[in-house]
Amino acid sequence: MADTKFAKIIAGEIPADKVYEDEHCIAINDINPQAPVHVLVIPKQPIEKLADARPDDQALLGHLMLAAGNIARQLGVDDAFRLIVNNGAGAGQTVFHLHLHIIAGRSFAEGKMVG
Ligand code: 5GP
């Protein structure tokens, strides 16, 4: 896969506002936040998009979910946040290195799944 912006951020070649890091992932504040809290959880091992994940990636995917919950708690938004993965350009994916969006701090329309 192409060397994406996120690979460069993980390599330290592009600066980012890091809020969390462990052996398997980093979390950074989104450069163009859509809510008061908008954090991206990014695996260090690149996967282009969620649909490309393989059975071998199961532990990593679980790790990302657990990390997202811990980061939400660390940021004080574990009571109300959304976790979003855009898969493919048609769904709005612009950086082709899997990442989870943690969105919080704004009101979410009651009963709506997205938006
Ligand atoms: P996608 O649309 O692929 O699901 O999400 C990509 C996200 O990455 C967007 O919300 C965009 O604002 C964010 N983003 C793109 N380039 C950079 C960057 O260089 N630094 C940071 N922190 N966020 C970025």
Image (cartoon, rainbow, N blue to C red):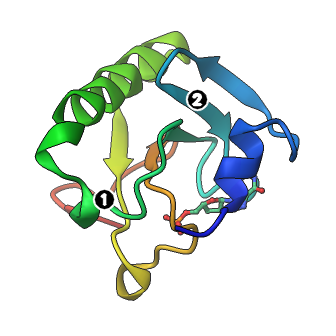
Q: Residue at x 38, y 66 (%)?
A: 86
User: Is residue 45 visible to us here?
Assistant: yes
| CB within 8 Å, label 1 to label 2 | no
Q: Closest to the observer: 50 or 102?
A: 50
Left or right for 31, reference 83: right
Q: Closest to the observer: 86 or 81?
A: 86
Amino acid at pointer 1: Ala
Q: Residue at x 17, y 36 (%)?
A: 58
- Residue 8, above or below 56: below
Left or right for 24, reference 33: left
Q: Residue at x 81, y 39 (%)?
A: 16
The picture places residue 80, in percent across and down from the top left corner, at 34, 31
The picture places residue 57, in percent across and down from the top left corner, at 23, 40
Ligand 1, what quadrant?
A: bottom right
Q: Which mark is residue 52?
A: none
- Name the residue beneath numbered marker 1: 109
* First-in-chain label (1 vs 2): 2
- Residue 86, above or below 94: above
Q: Hey, which residue is sitting farthest left in the picture? A: 55
- Of tags 1 and 2, the one toward the viewer is 2
- Residue 108, above or below 16: below
User: Is residue 78 visible to us here?
Assistant: no
The picture places residue 97, in percent across and down from the top left corner, at 51, 58
Amino acid at pointer 2: Ile
Q: Secondary structure at mark 1?
A: loop
Q: Residues within 10 Å of mark 1 (few under 14, many from 20)?
A: few
Q: Which mark is residue 26?
A: 2
Left or right for 17, reference 6: right
Q: Looking at the figure, which quarter contains the C terminus? A: bottom left
